[in-house]
Amino acid sequence: MWLDAFLAYLHFVSIFVLFGYLIVEMVTIKGELDAAGIRRLARADIIYFGAAIAAFVTGLLRLFYGARGSGFYLTSWPIYVKVAIFLVIGLISVMPTLTILRWRRAVDQDAAWKVPAQEQRKVRRIVMAELHLAALVPIFAVIMSRGLGR
């Protein structure tokens, strides 16, 4: 029981950090991006990535070592929807991450470099899509955890 509670806690904390830093990215991208803003955005993206890995790993740990066991979850369709959404978010987050890294390299070479407005809007739209997709995951988590998708 204690292991299950501890794993649940770690899973929830990683999810809260994931959402928090995704929102930090969205708010930062919305504003004017000077050299400090680009560095802050790059740092937030790294933390977001780490939180996503932590959420995935702690989810797997809960699946295999949690109180309900893998049989409870793997026979329920919502877990597959959750994982699919999570993977889609991961795939679409590659482009913003690579773009942010490119911006950081550019500003490291020339502190006066400015982010092209069109690129900034595109990255912001993708981050917003990630946030909206991530907001769907808890719906399926609730369905799954209550055994409603069996």
Image (cartoon, helix red, strand yellow):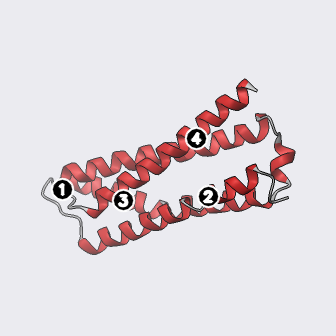
Circle 3: residue type: Met
From the viewer's side, name the closer residue of 117 and 27. 27
Q: Hey, which quadrant is residue 90 in on the image?
A: bottom right
Q: Hey, which quadrant is residue 14 in on the image?
A: top right
Residue 110 % position (x, y): 16, 55
Q: Could you tell me which quadrant the N terminus lies in? A: top right
Kindly identify which residue carries mark 3: 26
Q: Earlier in the sequence, mark 2 or mark 4?
A: 4
Q: Earlier in the sequence, mark 1 or mark 2?
A: 1
Q: Are marks 2 and 3 in contact (CB under 8 Å)?
A: no
Residue 41 % position (x, y): 32, 51
Characterize the local packing of mark 3: few (<14), some (14-19) or many (20 or more) Cα atoms within 10 angstroms.
many
Work out how far the residue at label 2 is from the one at label 3, CA to CA, in angstroms: 19 Å
Work out how far the residue at label 1 is from the one at label 4, CA to CA, in angstroms: 33 Å
Residue, x 61% and y 39% (percent of image)? 11
Q: Which type of secondary structure does the marked residue at label 4 adopt?
A: helix
Q: Which type of secondary structure does the marked residue at label 2 adopt?
A: helix
Work out how far the residue at label 1 is from the one at label 2, CA to CA, in angstroms: 33 Å
Kindly identify which residue carries mark 4: 12
Q: Nearer the viewer, mark 2 or mark 3?
A: 2
Q: Could you tell me which quadrant the C terminus lies in? A: bottom right
